[in-house]
Image: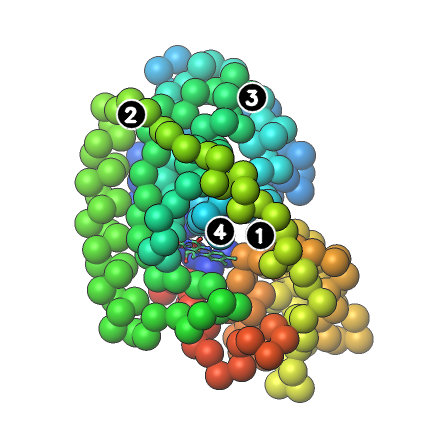
Amino acid sequence: MIFYFTGTGNSLAAAKALAEEQEPLINLADANREKAYRYTVEKGGRIGFVFPEYCSTLCKPVLEFVRNLEVKGNPYCFAVITCGGVISFAAGMLRHELAQRGIRLCYAAFVRMPNNAVFYSETPDDSKQTRLLGKADIKLAALKEKLKAHPVRAVRGGLLAEKSQPILIKSSKTAPFRAEASCTGCGACAKRCPEQAIRMENGKPVWVKDSCAICMACISRCPVGAIEYGDKTAGRRRYVHPSLR
Ligand SMILES: Cc1cc2nc3c(=O)[nH]c(=O)nc-3n(C[C@H](O)[C@H](O)[C@H](O)COP(=O)(O)O)c2cc1C
Ligand code: SF4
Ligand code: SF4
């Protein structure tokens, strides 16, 4: 079974590309909401984690899920982390967190995909997206084959990812979010938010939690581009994986 987290679709597409036929794909944000933390894997089976890198560290939903997880069956365990290009330290932290739950992370890989972090920078244009997604498809197909043999490779590091947690938490404030007048009140942002941080009030979204997962789902997937974040995002392209457009 593969546990995934996604804001803008890259990691969902990666999880689908890696899954074997009939292998369950479990959205770990849904699992967090439902407190579904207990899983049993049949003998010789596997679990995988597929999620985005945030600020060189683990994002909140992944941490919450892993810190509660109970897995029976001693499965093979791997992780595939999607990222926008910066070298990642998140796998080492995941290894450490899983070890606390009695799970050995045997293998981790990174797949570069288009950067979705519109708070921080411009996102790639169409031709760069196409190029990156084409390369990612090739890497994912190779990883799918490789993972069949349950490879084992030391997963190192983690300290830098631990140190990046305060940076991520500091960046997670919802106060700068706002919906502009073009908002149609469709409610998609509230429905999709993995943290239940958005509530519709009088036909408009209101961010009701102080902080969130900063997954970019609301700001990037609003059908009319009505959401802005402080003065950082006006005029910037929103990135969404083609499978979610
Ligand atoms: C808050 C935030 C921080 C990010 N930090 C990093 C980073 O440190 N390194 C990196 O390579 N990509 C970073 N990214 C880019 C994402 O990891 C990348 O676009 C990912 O594939 C998005 O996955 P998703 O579409 O499944 O949400 C960041 C994205 C967000 C939203
Ligand atoms: S997704 Fe966009 S249009 Fe729909 S309610 Fe949210 S902000 Fe408004
Ligand atoms: S408020 Fe927006 S960015 Fe924050 S977790 Fe919800 S959907 Fe993601």
For marks 3 and 1, the one nearer the N-term is 3
State how far apart marks 3 and 2 are (Cα).
Answer: 19 Å
At 66% across and 77% down in the image, what residue appears? Answer: 179
Provide the residue designation for mark 2: 153
Provide the residue designation for mark 4: 54
Q: Quadrant of residue 190?
A: bottom right
Could you tell me the amino acid type at mark 2?
A: Arg
Ligand 1 within 8 Å of disc 1? The answer is: yes
At 26% across and 45% down in the image, what residue appears? Answer: 140
State how far apart marks 1 and 2 are (Cα).
Answer: 28 Å
For marks 1 and 2, the one nearer the N-term is 2
Q: Secondary structure at mark 1?
A: helix
Provide the residue designation for mark 3: 100
State how far apart marks 1 and 4 are (Cα).
Answer: 7 Å
At 25% across and 73% down in the image, what residue appears? Answer: 127
Front-most of residues 26 and 57: 57
